[in-house]
Structure formats: structure tokens, C-alpha cells
Amino acid sequence: MTSRRSPIVRHALGLAVALAALIGSPSGSQAREWNEVLAEARGQTVYFNAWAGDPQTNAFIAWVGEEAEERFGVEVEHVKLTDTAEAVARVLAEKSAGRDQGGSVDLVWINGANFLAMRQQDLLFGPFAQDLPNWRYVDTTNKPSNVIDFTVPTEGYESPWHMAQIVYVYDSARIAAYDLPRSMPAMLEWVKENPGRLTHPTVRDFLGATFLKQALYELAPDPAVLQEPATDATFAATVEPLWAWYDALRPHLWRGGREFPANGPAQRQLMSDGEIELYAAFNPAEAAVAIRLGTLPRTARVYVPDGGTIGNTSFVAIPYNAAHKEAAMVVADFLLSPEVQARAQDPEQLGNFTVLDLAKLDPAQQALFERPADAVAVPTNQEMGSMLLEPHPSWMTRIVEAWEQRYLP
């Protein structure tokens, strides 16, 4: 299998193995007896700052809170965000004001760009991830994105809790599998033949930006450059094919590319209303979950183009000045437990793929991850194809800025 991986993936796997060796053992001064952590956590409230744009995720976090309170005496308060940058800005403001203890953010669902920003400004507590008891189950070898976040080594300053990968959602009753566009150039031809039947969220939403990054990956003259920080020179040369492709695509998008849905759920609603026939999602179980909720027809399916798609791991991190670090660690560890991971992967709940190495689990735990027989809209591992590593965060920042300059009035 190794010989079939791209040079980028092989490099990442090597780096992941090296990082795993570095962070696989307790880290001296940060290492604490877990029982002591549990004792100090009891009675604390974790202010969990997390994106709140998806009702299923909100319900999952609420369930985690109920279980954490019952099992560990830890209360979880979901601070609902529209953008993770809100939490980052709050921690930064507190640091500027000299509030180095008793901060208002205990745990944050963080993405690569914000992780890099917080690391560069020493806003994170840690390393702590390797001290979590359930860390022993995490796949740090074959899932390199668990220890490399948008090309940045996590070094134990954030803990994974689920994985995602771009898929495209379609209605198999309206589009035959052999008619699906299997690449970005093919998507341009498809949308010309089906005008107004494709859209993407505004690029200020992470899914909208990710749609553009996926196109960049496929169209860039040398995609390997995406693993390095963007410079003026590399950015200009690399994105030129992207803008040429998008200039041709945009007039054929939903509403002529003059309007865009706010986020992924809004995009899903457009398909449910029959306004579009194809859209990108960042959850392989998008169709299965939506079918269960009745927001997509039972014939909805997902697919991955031939060259693979961008995937990444979602993490939680603890700010350096968090008021309740022990409780935050308890919640982070609970999110890594096989029970919670299996619940998250269940299409009846979230359908998020696990960060664990199932080979490290016992047979009873492995059985928790078996796909339900009636969940035919969930892709198999083989159908997911190759996962492409996220570009360096600087690419996303520059793409969003450039897109807004080019296309917003």
C-alpha cells in the first residue's frame, strides 16, 4: 500500500511517525497523575467554544456535556460561535489586558489557521494531548493529520476528536454515477451543461474556502508547494489556473454566481428544495445523516473524485489562561474514548470518521464501529479514495482575500 501513496503523503507519514515518537510518552512537567486531574476537574465548568452552525453537532456536544456531568462531575457550557476566530480574539484580548489566569475560554474547537495563530502568539496550554489516557488509541501513524494540522505539527497542543474529508453530494435518482464530474475540469464542463445546479458556500465559511482549496489542489502546476507557506511569488503563479477556471465556472453557478449560501446546511437546503443537484460537503456521512433527518431524499449519495480530496482532523485545544484546565482535559479525553468516537461515527448521530486506530481496540470496541446495514449512503473506506493533506493555512487566508477582491462588488 505504501508504494501507491503520493510523495506528499509518504513525507507526511514519515513526519507523523517521528512526531509520534516525540509525543508518545508523558512530557515531564506536564505529566500529571490522571486521578489528580479527575479530582480537580470535579465541580468545574468547561466553557467549550465551538462552531454552532450545525444542529447535529450542537446536539452531540450537548450529549457530551450530559455524560461528562454524570460521569465526571464536569459541566460543559457550549459557547456557540459563528467563527472560531471569535474565541481566538477573546483570548488574545485577555492576554493583552494581562489576564493570564481565569480566562473565559476553557476549550476551543479549533482549525488549522487559528491553531497556527494561537501557537505563534503563545496562547495555548500544553503539551497535554499525550497525557490523556485515551491517547493510546489515537492513530498517529496512518492518519498523519492527527499530528499535523494544516502542515503544522501539533506537538501535543491540541487533541483530535474526529476526521473529515471532502465529498460531493448528489441525488442518484437524478444523476447517474457515470455522469458525475470526477475532476475540477470535468466539473466545469458539467456545470456548463447544467447551469445553476451547482454552488458553494461563501468563502468566508470554511467549506466555501475549502471548495476553492480543493480546486487549487487539482489545478496548481505543482501542488507540493501548498505544503509550504505561501509567498507573493508562489501564490501568484500557483493560483493563476484557479482563477482562470473559476472565471469560467462562476457564471454557471446557482444564481449566476452572484449569491452564495451562508454555510453547508444552507447549501443542503438548496438541494432539498430542488434548486441544485450537486454540492461539496466535509462529512463523508453527509448524505446518510441528512436522509435520516429527512433533509435529503433517500436516494442521496456521496462520491470522491478520482484524484482524492482534502481531508483533515478536527481538534480541541486549551488556551494558556483557561480557568478550568483540568476539566477541559477530562472532556478532551472523553472525546477520544472508543465509546464517544463510535457514537460520533454513527450516521444516526454525526457520521464523523474516527481518529482512532481500530487495530488498537479490543473486539468489543471494534464492533462499535461497524457500519449499520441500512446506512447504504455511508461510503466505504475504499470509496473514500486518497486523502490529500491540507495546504499550509497561509494559502487559505490569501485565497479568501483574493477571492473577495476579485468577485465581491
Image (cartoon, helix red, strand yellow):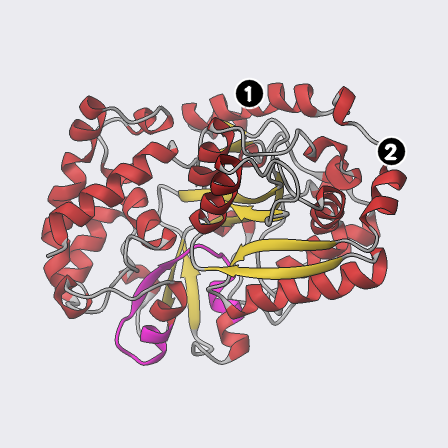
Query: Between tags 1 and 2, which lies in front?
Result: 2
- Say which amino acid is labelled 2: Glu
State how far apart marks 1 and 2 are (Cα). 31 Å
Residue hosting label 1: 14
| Outermost residue, front side | 97
Instruction: Report x, y in % for residue 354.
Output: 63, 49
User: Where 332 sits versus 238, above or below?
Assistant: below
Residue 276 drawn at (x, y percent): 27, 71
Label 2: few (<14), some or many (≥20) within 10 Å? Answer: few
> Which quadrant is the C terminus positioned in?
bottom left
Total number of numbered discs in the rendering: 2
Which residue is located at x 52 percent, y 70 percent? 55
Percent coordinates x, y for residue 218 in the rendering = 27, 39
Q: Quadrant of residue 134?
A: top right
- Is 114 placed left or right of 62 in the picture? left
Q: Quadrant of the N terminus?
A: top right
Residue identifier under label 2: 33
> Disc 1, disc 2: CB below 8 Å?
no
Secondary structure, mark 2, is loop
Taking depth in this image into account, of 241 and 104 the one nearest to the observer is: 104
Task: Inspect this view and state whether residue 175 appears.
Answer: yes
- Give the magenta-colored segment's residue range: 269-289
Name the mark on residue 368.
none
Q: Amino acid at mark 1?
A: Gly
Q: Nearer the viewer, residue 132 or 273?
A: 132
Residue at the spot 32% in from the left edge and 62% down from the top edge: 279
Along the line of sight, the residue nearer the viewer: 65 or 239:
65
| Residue that appears at 56% across and 30% down | 154
Q: Secondary structure at mark 1?
A: helix
From this view, report whether residue 345 is shown above or below residue 384: below
Q: Position of residue 268 (x, y in %)?
A: 38, 70
